[in-house]
Image (cartoon, grey):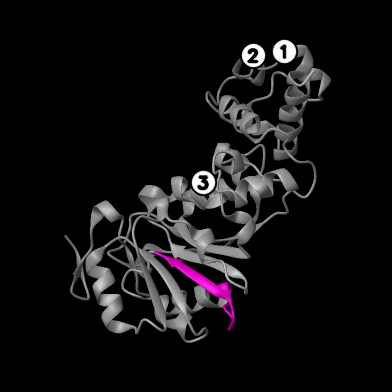
Amino acid sequence: MKTVAGHTARKRFGQNFLVSPGIIHKIVDAIAPHPGDTVVEIGPGLGAITEPLLERIDHLHVVEIDRDLIARLQQRFPPERLSVHEGDALKFDFGSLKGSGPLKIVGNLPYNISSPLLFHLVAFAQRVHDMHFMLQKEVVDRMVADPGSKDFGRLSVMLQYHYHMERLFVVPPGAFNPAPKVDSAIVRMIPRKVGADEATALQGGRAKDALLAVADGDAAKDPALFARVVTAAFSQRRKMLRNTLRELISEADLAALGITPTARAEDIGVADYVRLANSLADLAGR
């Protein structure tokens, strides 16, 4: 077990602590916190980003599950500067922290729960101004991937429907202690606009109903159906859409929508999935 600054890094919590001053400075500059912002840090760890964030804002919220780290943070920072929320980020109600100013969520997300956590955060997207996360580079590449690439998948479609996303820069293993075996990357996520039905679902805390929100163009009429279509399409990536979606739509109807039946899931874009799901929603409503 690796010990960092007197703390034993716990593998079950996916702990890799950022120690590079240069990278820390770049991350905080990217977040660009301002007085009046409500900033929430997921997994503050040893406080590498916590301290420089507090140099720019009056108060910071952190969500941490490791009690040893919580004790260290509480000894280091007074409660009027730092609110520590003990618990699992996968179950935390981030929307409860929304104040009068912009809500910003940041963090070095544990690799072992990054995808489930990203989906959990979708339920709060419309209360958030922006998010900046450090994740495994492979995950970030999937998040921002374009249709037609090998990285484009279910995660790409579901998150790109909710957010404008940008990979900012790569973070090498040497920036951490203990050093992970892979590169990391910083991603910026800015929520897209949503419509009335989806906003109501989000405000009501119905995470399942709120999984899909409105993009800047067409909206998914039935969010659950949209999610089902995307999941089915990517369930067997090597198969053609006419096969993976045969339980939902015929080959002729796919072609009528302008979607090539012999295409594979990664060959069509987010707007195509919205159009496909909305066509099925219209058929079901007749």
Q: Is residue 272 above or below residue 78?
A: above
The quarter of the image holding the C terminus is top right
In this rendering, the answer to whether 230 lies above or below 32 is above
Q: Which mark is residue 250?
A: 1
Which residue was labeled with disc 2? 246
In the image, 173 versus 259, the foreground residue is 259
Q: Give the percent coordinates (x, y) of residue 171.
A: 45, 65
Dot 1: element: loop
Residue at image mark 3: 119
Residue at the image point whose x is 33% and y is 54% from the top: 181
Q: Residues within 10 Å of mark 2 (few under 14, many from 20)?
A: some
The amino acid on which the numbered mark 3 sits, given as a three-letter code, is Phe
Q: Is residue 24 left or right of residue 236?
A: left
Q: CA distance from mark 2 to mark 1?
A: 6 Å
Marks 2/1 in contact by CB < 8 Å: the verdict is yes
Which percent across, then down, holds residue 39?
A: 52, 72
Left or right of 285: which side holds 156?
A: left
- Specify the segment rendered in magenta: 30-42
Q: Is 264 covered by the magenta stretch?
A: no
Q: Is residue 174 above or below residue 110?
A: below
Is residue 145 at least partly visible in the picture? no
Helix, strand, or loop for circle 3?
helix
Q: Rounded to the nearest whole Å, what is the CA distance between mark 2 and mark 3?
A: 27 Å
Q: Amino acid at mark 2?
A: Arg
Please name the residue shown 71% across and 37% down the image: 269
